[in-house]
């Protein structure tokens, strides 16, 4: 799999259902959502039983396929859009992330440009995914509802799990929820009963595209975070620091240290550091052989 163009498959234990691909561009990215006919046998892309980054066999899986080529005519592209530049998400801009227009709705508007009724119905299927700086949240603005859906993000660091939920303040139930953990495995839950109460034929496709777009953007942002390595601890030496050469006035004591009958204090000091001499000051502390710090040892 190309890490710069991630692909995600939403599947059951037998075959995939949704296929989501992110193609980066110079400005941002192009996202494409495809859906497989559940009544047909899937020949590609690979299902959860194929070689994927996730080897799980759970009931609903969000996995990253290693062989993304389509080999099945029963796949249908349901939505394709370009993500806006990240700078547009913040003030003073309008916060637009992407226009989520179902492919069939776009086709209707292209085939019947003079049919105002068809164009109006097609526009009712097109939503907008926006970012709000005040709440630091994504919102799905859909023409079928007076107020937008909110995409809430809940993180569980202990389980390395993230939940993306599409909620509406007028409903106690969420429309859709996408859950994934640190291994790349996840689940998609869609409340079809709630979706049936909203006058939008492609609402589920738009909702899934919105959640996957937010999750993919969140994954890229997390991967882009870099941290400086911890500072290197200094290596402390247990040996004495190097000393400056002995001053000439003390050189005589160094030379006479090996002579028989020399002061034993001088002999002991010489053995500690060959070629250097440590003397004792008036307090009995060993210091470097300097005139200002050491007293002369008479022999």
Image (spheres, rainbow, N blue to C red):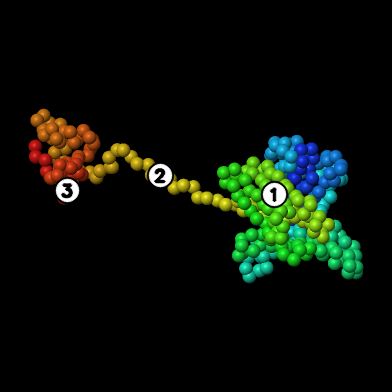
Residue with the mark numbered 3: 293
- In the structure shown, which secondary structural element does the residue marked by tag 1 occupy? strand
Q: Residues within 10 Å of mark 3 (few under 14, many from 20)?
A: some
Q: Are marks 2 and 1 in contact (CB under 8 Å)?
A: no
> What percent of the width, then of the height, locates residue 293?
17, 48
287 or 127, nearer to the observer: 127
For discs 2 and 3, the disc positioned in front in the rendered view: 2
Numbered badge on residue 233: 2
29 or 133, nearer to the observer: 133
Numbered badge on residue 178: 1
Residue for point 81% across, 64% down: 124
Q: Are marks 3 and 1 in contact (CB under 8 Å)?
A: no
Q: Is residue 95 visible?
A: yes
- Mark 3 or mark 1, which has the lower sequence index? 1
For discs 2 and 1, the disc positioned in front in the rendered view: 1
- In the structure shown, which secondary structural element does the residue marked by tag 2 occupy? loop
Question: Disc 3 to disc 1, how far (Cα)?
Answer: 74 Å
Q: Does 170 appear above or below 56? A: below
Could you say which quadrant of the image residue 259 lies in? top left
Work out which quarter of the rendered image holds the N terminus and state it: top right
Residue for point 21% across, 33% down: 271
187 or 8, nearer to the observer: 187
Numbered badge on residue 196: none
As drawn, the residue found furthest toward the front would be 172
Side (left or right) of 182 relative to 263 = right
Could you say which quadrant of the image residue 14 lies in? top right
- In the structure shown, which secondary structural element does the residue marked by tag 3 occupy? loop
Residue for point 75% across, 55% down: 207
Work out which quarter of the rendered image holds the C terminus and state it: top left
- Mark 2 or mark 1, which has the lower sequence index? 1
């Amino acid at each position: 799999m190309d890490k710069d163009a991630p692909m995600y498959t939403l599947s059951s234990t037998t075959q995939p259902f949704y296929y989501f691909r992110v193609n980066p561009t110079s400005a941002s990215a192009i996202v494409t959502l495809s859906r497989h006919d559940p009544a047909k046998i899937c020949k590609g892309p690979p299902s959860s039983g194929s070689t994927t980054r996730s080897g799980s066999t759970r009931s609903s899986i969000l996995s990253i396929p290693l062989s993304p080529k389509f080999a099945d005519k029963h796949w249908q592209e349901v939505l394709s859009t370009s993500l806006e530049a990240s700078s547009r998400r913040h003030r003073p801009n309008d916060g637009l992330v992407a226009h989520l227009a179902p492919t069939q709705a776009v086709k209707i508007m292209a085939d019947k440009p003079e049919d105002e009724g068809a164009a109006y119905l097609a526009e009712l299927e097109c939503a907008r995914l926006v970012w709000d700086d005040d709440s630091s949240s994504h919102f799905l603005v859909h023409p079928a509802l007076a107020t937008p859906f909110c995409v809430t993000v809940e993180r569980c660091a202990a389980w390395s799990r993230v939940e993306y939920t599409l909620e509406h303040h007028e409903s106690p139930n969420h429309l859709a929820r996408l859950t994934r953990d640190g291994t790349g495995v996840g689940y998609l839950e869609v409340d079809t009963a709630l979706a049936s109460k909203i006058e939008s034929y492609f609402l589920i496709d738009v909702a899934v595209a919105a959640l996957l777009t937010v999750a993919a953007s969140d994954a890229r942002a997390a991967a882009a975070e870099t941290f400086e390595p911890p500072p290197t601890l200094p290596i402390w030496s247990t040996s004495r620091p190097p000393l400056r050469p002995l001053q000439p006035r003390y050189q005589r004591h160094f030379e006479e240290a090996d002579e028989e009958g020399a002061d034993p204090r001088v002999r002991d000091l010489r053995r500690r550091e060959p070629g250097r001499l440590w003397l004792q000051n008036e307090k009995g502390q060993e210091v470097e052989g300097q005139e200002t710090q050491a007293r002369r040892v008479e022999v």
